[in-house]
Image (cartoon, helix red, strand yellow):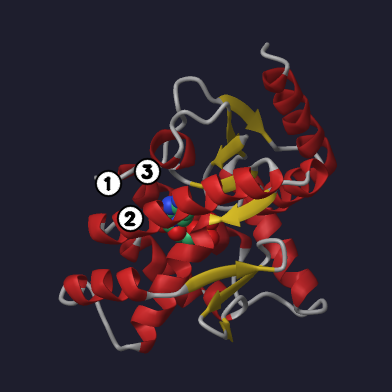
Amino acid sequence: MIIAIDGPAGAGKSTVAKAVATQLGFAYVNTGAMYRAVALCALEAGFALPENESEIVALARHLPIALHDAGSRVFVSERDITDLIRTAQVGDFTSRVSALPGVREVIVAQQRRIGRESEAECGGAVLEGRDIQTVVFPDAPVKIYLDASPAERARRRLSEWTLKSGGAAAPFSLEEAERDITGRDERDSTRETSPLCAADDAEHVITDGLTPDEVVARIVAIVERRAGGV
Ligand code: C5P
Protein backbone atom coordinates (compact mmCIF):
# COMPACT_ATOMS: atom_id res chain seq x y z
CA MET A 1 0.00 0.00 0.00
CA ILE A 2 1.23 3.47 -0.88
CA ILE A 3 0.36 6.28 1.53
CA ALA A 4 0.84 9.68 -0.10
CA ILE A 5 1.22 12.66 2.22
CA ASP A 6 1.60 16.14 0.74
CA GLY A 7 1.49 19.60 2.20
CA PRO A 8 3.44 22.83 2.62
CA ALA A 9 6.70 23.30 4.55
CA GLY A 10 6.26 23.00 8.30
CA ALA A 11 2.88 21.25 8.26
CA GLY A 12 4.43 18.38 10.23
CA LYS A 13 4.75 15.92 7.34
CA SER A 14 8.12 14.39 8.28
CA THR A 15 7.36 13.74 11.94
CA VAL A 16 3.95 12.33 11.17
CA ALA A 17 4.90 10.32 8.05
CA LYS A 18 7.81 8.70 9.91
CA ALA A 19 5.57 7.72 12.83
CA VAL A 20 2.83 6.37 10.55
CA ALA A 21 5.43 4.28 8.67
CA THR A 22 6.83 2.90 11.94
CA GLN A 23 3.39 2.03 13.24
CA LEU A 24 2.43 0.19 10.04
CA GLY A 25 5.86 -1.40 9.43
CA PHE A 26 6.17 0.43 6.10
CA ALA A 27 9.13 2.23 4.52
CA TYR A 28 9.38 5.99 5.01
CA VAL A 29 10.44 8.19 2.09
CA ASN A 30 11.18 11.89 2.59
CA THR A 31 11.06 13.07 -1.02
CA GLY A 32 12.09 16.63 -0.15
CA ALA A 33 15.41 15.23 1.10
CA MET A 34 16.06 13.81 -2.38
CA TYR A 35 15.59 17.24 -4.01
CA ARG A 36 17.69 18.76 -1.25
CA ALA A 37 20.50 16.28 -2.05
CA VAL A 38 20.52 17.47 -5.67
CA ALA A 39 20.53 21.12 -4.56
CA LEU A 40 23.40 20.58 -2.10
CA CYS A 41 25.58 18.82 -4.67
CA ALA A 42 24.76 21.46 -7.30
CA LEU A 43 25.80 24.24 -4.88
CA GLU A 44 29.00 22.37 -4.02
CA ALA A 45 29.77 22.05 -7.73
CA GLY A 46 29.39 25.83 -8.03
CA PHE A 47 26.27 25.65 -10.20
CA ALA A 48 23.75 28.47 -10.31
CA LEU A 49 20.36 29.02 -11.93
CA PRO A 50 19.28 29.73 -14.58
CA GLU A 51 22.68 29.36 -16.27
CA ASN A 52 23.51 25.79 -15.19
CA GLU A 53 20.12 24.10 -15.69
CA SER A 54 21.42 21.35 -18.00
CA GLU A 55 24.42 20.63 -15.74
CA ILE A 56 22.09 20.32 -12.72
CA VAL A 57 19.76 17.94 -14.58
CA ALA A 58 22.79 15.83 -15.62
CA LEU A 59 24.03 15.85 -12.02
CA ALA A 60 20.61 14.68 -10.75
CA ARG A 61 20.57 11.86 -13.29
CA HIS A 62 23.86 10.42 -12.00
CA LEU A 63 23.57 11.20 -8.29
CA PRO A 64 23.55 7.99 -6.21
CA ILE A 65 21.03 9.09 -3.55
CA ALA A 66 20.25 6.48 -0.89
CA LEU A 67 17.99 6.57 2.16
CA HIS A 68 19.18 4.65 5.23
CA ASP A 69 18.10 4.05 8.85
CA ALA A 70 14.41 3.64 8.06
CA GLY A 71 14.54 6.63 5.74
CA SER A 72 15.84 9.03 8.36
CA ARG A 73 19.37 9.48 6.94
CA VAL A 74 20.26 10.62 3.44
CA PHE A 75 23.43 9.52 1.67
CA VAL A 76 25.11 10.33 -1.62
CA SER A 77 27.34 7.31 -2.23
CA GLU A 78 29.04 6.72 1.14
CA ARG A 79 28.62 10.31 2.34
CA ASP A 80 26.00 11.10 4.99
CA ILE A 81 24.50 14.48 4.02
CA THR A 82 21.50 14.42 6.40
CA ASP A 83 22.55 17.51 8.35
CA LEU A 84 24.15 19.38 5.44
CA ILE A 85 20.87 19.52 3.47
CA ARG A 86 19.01 21.26 6.30
CA THR A 87 20.57 24.74 5.96
CA ALA A 88 18.46 27.71 4.84
CA GLN A 89 20.73 28.17 1.80
CA VAL A 90 20.12 24.59 0.62
CA GLY A 91 16.37 24.88 1.39
CA ASP A 92 16.10 28.00 -0.70
CA PHE A 93 18.07 26.59 -3.65
CA THR A 94 16.06 23.35 -3.44
CA SER A 95 12.81 25.10 -4.24
CA ARG A 96 14.45 26.46 -7.43
CA VAL A 97 16.17 23.19 -8.37
CA SER A 98 12.97 21.18 -7.79
CA ALA A 99 11.10 23.42 -10.25
CA LEU A 100 13.27 22.11 -13.12
CA PRO A 101 11.25 19.57 -15.16
CA GLY A 102 14.38 17.52 -15.96
CA VAL A 103 15.24 17.17 -12.27
CA ARG A 104 11.67 16.20 -11.38
CA GLU A 105 11.56 13.55 -14.08
CA VAL A 106 14.66 11.82 -12.69
CA ILE A 107 13.70 12.09 -9.02
CA VAL A 108 10.06 11.06 -9.53
CA ALA A 109 11.24 7.89 -11.34
CA GLN A 110 13.45 7.06 -8.32
CA GLN A 111 10.55 7.68 -5.92
CA ARG A 112 8.26 5.35 -7.88
CA ARG A 113 10.93 2.66 -7.86
CA ILE A 114 11.50 2.99 -4.09
CA GLY A 115 7.73 2.88 -3.47
CA ARG A 116 7.23 -0.26 -5.56
CA GLU A 117 10.26 -2.01 -4.03
CA SER A 118 9.03 -1.17 -0.52
CA GLU A 119 5.59 -2.61 -1.29
CA ALA A 120 7.28 -5.85 -2.32
CA GLU A 121 9.67 -5.87 0.66
CA CYS A 122 7.52 -4.74 3.58
CA GLY A 123 3.99 -4.24 2.29
CA GLY A 124 4.03 -0.51 1.75
CA ALA A 125 5.59 2.92 1.89
CA VAL A 126 4.70 6.30 3.28
CA LEU A 127 5.95 9.00 0.92
CA GLU A 128 5.80 12.64 1.90
CA GLY A 129 6.36 15.66 -0.31
CA ARG A 130 4.52 18.10 -2.55
CA ASP A 131 3.31 16.06 -5.53
CA ILE A 132 3.07 12.48 -4.30
CA GLN A 133 -0.72 12.22 -4.61
CA THR A 134 -0.97 14.25 -7.82
CA VAL A 135 2.06 13.06 -9.83
CA VAL A 136 4.22 10.35 -8.24
CA PHE A 137 1.44 7.97 -7.12
CA PRO A 138 -1.89 9.39 -8.37
CA ASP A 139 -3.48 5.98 -7.77
CA ALA A 140 -2.36 5.72 -4.13
CA PRO A 141 -5.21 4.30 -2.04
CA VAL A 142 -4.51 6.76 0.78
CA LYS A 143 -3.95 10.46 0.03
CA ILE A 144 -3.51 12.92 2.85
CA TYR A 145 -3.11 16.67 2.49
CA LEU A 146 -1.52 17.90 5.70
CA ASP A 147 -1.70 21.61 6.44
CA ALA A 148 -1.39 24.18 9.23
CA SER A 149 -1.68 27.96 9.31
CA PRO A 150 1.52 29.93 8.44
CA ALA A 151 1.61 31.33 12.00
CA GLU A 152 1.51 27.84 13.51
CA ARG A 153 4.20 26.59 11.10
CA ALA A 154 6.45 29.56 11.92
CA ARG A 155 6.02 28.87 15.67
CA ARG A 156 7.01 25.23 15.12
CA ARG A 157 10.09 26.21 13.12
CA LEU A 158 11.22 28.56 15.88
CA SER A 159 10.70 26.02 18.66
CA GLU A 160 12.45 23.29 16.62
CA TRP A 161 15.43 25.62 16.21
CA THR A 162 15.50 26.43 19.92
CA LEU A 163 15.30 22.74 20.81
CA LYS A 164 18.13 21.79 18.41
CA SER A 165 20.40 24.61 19.55
CA GLY A 166 19.98 23.77 23.23
CA GLY A 167 17.95 26.90 24.06
CA ALA A 168 19.99 29.57 22.22
CA ALA A 169 18.08 32.48 20.67
CA ALA A 170 17.19 31.80 17.04
CA PRO A 171 18.90 33.99 14.40
CA PHE A 172 15.47 34.74 12.91
CA SER A 173 12.24 36.17 14.32
CA LEU A 174 8.77 34.66 14.23
CA GLU A 175 7.79 37.22 11.58
CA GLU A 176 10.81 36.30 9.43
CA ALA A 177 10.02 32.60 9.74
CA GLU A 178 6.43 33.24 8.67
CA ARG A 179 7.58 35.38 5.73
CA ASP A 180 9.99 32.67 4.63
CA ILE A 181 7.29 30.00 4.91
CA THR A 182 4.70 31.95 2.90
CA GLY A 183 7.36 32.77 0.27
CA ARG A 184 8.21 29.09 -0.14
CA ASP A 185 4.49 28.15 -0.26
CA GLU A 186 3.98 30.71 -2.99
CA ARG A 187 6.92 29.35 -5.06
CA ASP A 188 5.95 25.70 -4.54
CA SER A 189 2.29 26.22 -5.40
CA THR A 190 2.63 28.55 -8.38
CA ARG A 191 5.46 26.82 -10.28
CA GLU A 192 4.58 25.32 -13.67
CA THR A 193 5.83 21.79 -13.03
CA SER A 194 4.00 19.78 -10.35
CA PRO A 195 2.78 22.66 -8.20
CA LEU A 196 1.84 21.89 -4.61
CA CYS A 197 -1.88 21.19 -4.45
CA ALA A 198 -4.23 18.66 -2.91
CA ALA A 199 -5.65 15.88 -5.09
CA ASP A 200 -9.43 16.03 -5.52
CA ASP A 201 -9.83 12.85 -3.49
CA ALA A 202 -7.32 13.77 -0.74
CA GLU A 203 -8.33 13.79 2.92
CA HIS A 204 -7.40 17.16 4.45
CA VAL A 205 -5.89 17.09 7.92
CA ILE A 206 -5.32 20.49 9.53
CA THR A 207 -2.75 20.14 12.29
CA ASP A 208 -3.20 23.45 14.18
CA GLY A 209 -3.75 22.60 17.82
CA LEU A 210 -3.15 18.87 17.35
CA THR A 211 -0.24 16.92 18.82
CA PRO A 212 1.80 14.72 16.43
CA ASP A 213 0.28 11.64 18.13
CA GLU A 214 -3.23 12.92 17.42
CA VAL A 215 -2.38 13.52 13.76
CA VAL A 216 -0.81 10.05 13.45
CA ALA A 217 -3.91 8.46 15.00
CA ARG A 218 -6.14 10.26 12.47
CA ILE A 219 -4.04 9.11 9.55
CA VAL A 220 -3.82 5.51 10.77
CA ALA A 221 -7.63 5.53 11.14
CA ILE A 222 -7.93 6.74 7.52
CA VAL A 223 -5.53 3.97 6.37
CA GLU A 224 -7.54 1.33 8.24
CA ARG A 225 -10.77 2.64 6.74
CA ARG A 226 -9.30 2.56 3.22
CA ALA A 227 -7.75 -0.89 3.78
CA GLY A 228 -11.22 -2.09 4.79
CA GLY A 229 -12.52 -0.72 1.48
CA VAL A 230 -14.57 2.13 3.01
O1 C5P B 1 9.98 18.87 2.32
P1 C5P B 1 11.13 19.83 2.25
O2 C5P B 1 10.83 21.15 2.87
O3 C5P B 1 12.41 19.25 2.73
O4 C5P B 1 11.32 20.10 0.69
C1 C5P B 1 12.26 21.04 0.22
C2 C5P B 1 11.78 21.60 -1.11
O5 C5P B 1 11.79 20.53 -2.07
C3 C5P B 1 10.36 22.13 -1.14
O6 C5P B 1 10.28 23.49 -0.78
C4 C5P B 1 9.95 21.91 -2.58
O7 C5P B 1 10.40 23.00 -3.36
C5 C5P B 1 10.74 20.70 -2.99
N1 C5P B 1 9.94 19.47 -3.05
C6 C5P B 1 9.23 19.21 -4.20
N2 C5P B 1 8.55 18.05 -4.35
C7 C5P B 1 8.53 17.15 -3.37
C8 C5P B 1 9.22 17.39 -2.15
C9 C5P B 1 9.91 18.58 -2.03
O8 C5P B 1 9.22 20.02 -5.11
N3 C5P B 1 7.86 15.99 -3.56
According to the picture, the residue beneath numbered tag 3 turns out to be 189
Mark toward the start of the polypeptide (1 vs 2):
2
Q: Is mark 2 within 8 Å of ligand 1?
A: yes
Residue depicted at 78% across the width and 25% down the height: 221
Report the mark closest to the observer, 1 or 2.
Answer: 2
Q: Give the mark toward the camera: 2 or 3.
A: 2
Q: Nearer the viewer, residue 30 or 12?
A: 30
Q: Are marks 1 and 2 in contact (CB under 8 Å)?
A: yes
On the image, the x and y values in percent for residue 25 come to: 78, 46
Location of the C terminus by quadrant is: top right
Q: Is residue 228 above or below residue 193?
A: above
Q: In the drawing, what numbered circle is on residue 104? A: 2
Badge 1 is on which residue?
193
Query: Which secondary structure lies at badge 1?
Result: loop
* Crowd tier of the residue under label 2, counting other residues whose Cα lies within 10 Å: few below 14, some 14–19, many 20 or above: some
Q: Nearer the viewer, residue 128 or 184?
A: 128
